[in-house]
Structure formats: structure tokens, C-alpha cells
Image: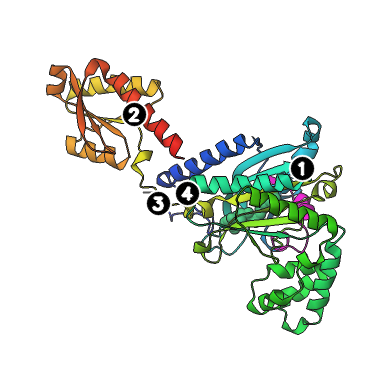
Amino acid sequence: MREAQPMIRGVRGAPDILPVEVIRWQRAEAAARRILENYGYQEIRTPIFERTELFVRGIGEGTDIVDKQMYTFEDRGHESLTLRPEGTAPVIRAYLEHRLFTQGDLCKVYYIGPMFRHERPQAGRFRQFHQIGAEAIGVADAAVDAEVIDLLAHLFDTLGVDTWELQLNSIGDEACRPLFRERFARYMRGRKEKLCPDCLVRLERNPLRILDCKVAGCRALVAEAPNSLDSLCEKCETHFRRLQELLQLLKIDYTINNHLVRGLDYYTRTTFEFVNPALGAQNAIAGGGRYDLLVGEMGGPPTPGIGFAIGLERLLISLPPEDSKEAWAGVFAAVLGEEAFQMGLRIIQELRRKGIRAALDMEGRSLKSQMRLAHKECYRHALILGDEELKAGLATVKDMAQGGQEQVPLREVVDWLMSRERRGAAQEGSDR
Ligand code: HAM
């Protein structure tokens, strides 16, 4: 006899997404794709792992991601590889490797997929999580910043994110950021005794990363420290002013958060986050910014860029519960008896071939439990076929979402259902 084996569980912080949840993911992804493509973005798919040095150089040593969170391993050929913790560095690598800059001034790409960071799992924070990200590479004008922000605002409104707030900052460029870094480091050096041990190291290696620290004492110091806006050079100030004017023109509300530097080293000028205050500690549903030096640092010609990434898990918990019956679609044939089963089978075959979601009972359930199943699986129509209906050449069609039922001649039932289903889908499309 075989011994009972212990069950192997999934890895902490890397949750499964079960079929009942997947529908919400697909809806959010589909809306994002549609909107991104309307704004001129094309999808790019890069591998899930890259050479470790790509992230070390792109994101920066001294950042939490590079120092503490990467899933790095040596493969069988003794090469150091890393599961991607984010999507910007891989996209820039692909942009340079495939010379996408030769295809026009502005390269606009988006990606959807899993990212990996070894963080302490908690609500809204995972080790495998998913991002919808976009990068617009090649143009320095603040109009691109405004467009990227407008895209996110549009997506969040379309999906019905209950509350979102846009926080905005500018962290300067190669001309003025060193000045800010120096003023900030000088301030912190004078208050060393109040910094946590991690921040003492940050002070030496990468002082601006103190801005990421979550320790209360360090946060209190940061609140009083010099901020980047006070050190901006004229060009950065003009850029930031233009961005704000364009956001006002587009009627997008924002607040300035002059401590928003974000946890990656590649940013210059604009940084922003969309937060949902209802989410607690992990409340950033999307973050991004400009990175005008990154392409050059990755070995390419000097090229400006800007992008963002949405955390899909956090986006989904910010959406209203999906109880809208407008989302119901498809036809469930509830059949009684073999003759009705065969008629139902032919009808759902035809509906499926015409692109309609359709199903029928294959387990000989009672009518009541077939109707219960159709309801549970959110079918919009139940097509009821029994002996009497067949004799009369009729089918009973029940509208599961709105209630009410009608008798429809069997000959016409496929066309009738098709037009009802199409109307429902068009209605839903215009609602979203
Ligand atoms: P990020 O702020 O590190 O930026 O991540 C973007 C979003 O991913 C966050 O706002 C959050 O919603 C989600 N996220 C990050 N870490 C986790 C986690 N452990 N669990 C769940 N969700 C998480 C970037 O990744 C940049 N590449 C964005 C960008 C693109 N900047 C310019 N272009």
C-alpha cells in the first residue's frame, strides 16, 4: 500500500489566483489594454528573468530592491540571474538591444505580468505580484508626463476605483539633484544620533534613500529635512510648472508631496504616485516618474523617458465588489429529458460557434438545481427546454439578471438570444 504523502503548500507571499477571482483580473487587464492602446501604447513582453547586473545598474545599489529584495540565483551555467523586481530596466534593455529608437522619436510600450520582490508579506504586499506598466521613451516635454498621468486617472475612473489621490513631486536633474542630495545629507549628518542603523549606512552610501525609511524616528527627521523642490534649477522648475499647468488644463487634481522620491534610483524631475487612502500602509496603487538619464546609464544614447506601473493586486482591492448583473453574459440551457438534451446541445453548439458563452447540464440535474447553477455562474439567459416546450415548438427563455421570461419559437431562438446577448454586451461596453 502506498504511504499517504504530506501536502506541499504554495510559497508564502505568492498567492494563487483562483478561477472565481480571475474574472476580475481579466476585466481590469482588458480595460487597461484598451485604454493604453487608445493612448498609443503597444504591448511588449520581456522575459521574467534577466542578468542581475541589469537591475543593479538600473535600479541602483543602496536601494531596498537591489540590496534586500531581489530573487537572485546562479543558473547551471554559473550566470547570476534575477527574477524581475520591476519592468522599466528590462524594457530599456530591450529598447536598446532591438534599437527601437530607430522607429520614431517616441516609443510607447506597455507590459502586464508578474514581478518578484522578497518583501515581508502583509496586506497588499506580496513576493510575487503583478504590474501593468508603461514606458514612453524619447521625449522630454512635460506634456508626456501629463499624458501619462491622464491615462492613469482615466483608467482608475473607468474601472471605478473608489477614491484615489495623485501625489506629485519633482526631484530635479543632474544639475540640481547633487545640490539637494548634499543639503539633505548635511542635515542628516548633523542628526546622526537619531537615525536608525540602516539609515546610518544609507547616509554613507545613498543618502536620499533615507526618504524611504519607515522607522518613526527617521520619518520625523525627514519631515523637517530640506526638500527637493527648494533646490530645483530653472529648467526643472519650468518643467514642473508646465506639468502642473497641463494637469490643471486637463482637470486632474493633485497634491504636492515634496518628500516623494520613490524607491528606485533612476528618477529625475517628475515623480508621482496614485494612492488609495482606504488601503492602509500599502496604499500606492501606482507609481512612476521621469528617468531622463537611465537610457544613457544603460549604455544607450542620452534619451529621456517616463513611465509608471500599477500594482494589480492593490488596484483590484480598490474596486467596488462585482455584483453588477450587467456583467452577466451567456446562455445556460436547462434541459429535462434526452430529447430536450439533444435539442439543447445543438443550440449551445450553434451559440458557441457564433461567439456566445453557453453551457448545458450534463449531469441530469433537476430543473431547480440547473437554474441554481445558471445563477451561480452568472449566465444572463436560461433556456428552458422540456417535453411540453418541444411539442409546442417553443423554448422558454428566462432573463436571469432582470427577471421575467418569454416563450420564443424554437426556430428563432438562436437569433433571438444572439441579439439579446449582443445588446447586453454593447450596453456593458458603454458603461465602462
Ligand atoms: P514601484 O513603485 O516599485 O515602481 O511599483 C509600482 C507599483 O507596484 C506600486 O505602486 C505598487 O502598487 C505595486 N507593488 C510594488 N511592490 C509590491 C509588492 N511587494 N506587492 C504588491 N504590489 C507591489 C516600479 O516598479 C517602477 N518600475 C514604475 C515605473 C515605470 N517608473 C517608471 N516607469
Comparing labels 3 and 2, the label whose residue is closer to the camera: 3
Q: Identify the secondary structure beneath mark 3.
A: loop
Segment colored magenta: 49-67
Q: Which mark is residue 398?
A: none
Residue 139 appears at what percent x and percent y? 78, 42
The answer to whether residue 267 is visible is no
Instruction: Read off the residue under disc 4.
Output: 160
Secondary element at tag 4: loop
Above or below 113: residue 125: below
Question: Mark 1 = which residue?
Answer: 93
User: First in sequence: mark 4 or mark 2?
Assistant: 4
Q: Amino acid at mark 2?
A: Ala
Q: Position of residue 294 (x, y in %)?
A: 80, 50
Quickly name the residue at label 2.
358
- Give the crowd class for mark 3: few <14, some 14-19, many >=20 residues within 10 Å: few
- Count the numbered circles shown: 4
Q: Is residue 384 above or below residue 153?
A: above
**Callout 2: SS:** strand
Amino acid at circle 3? Pro
> From this viewpoint, which residue is outermost toward the top?
411
Q: Earlier in the sequence, mark 4 or mark 3?
A: 4
Answer yes or no: is residue 250 visible. Answer: yes
Q: Is mark 1 within 8 Å of ligand 1?
A: no
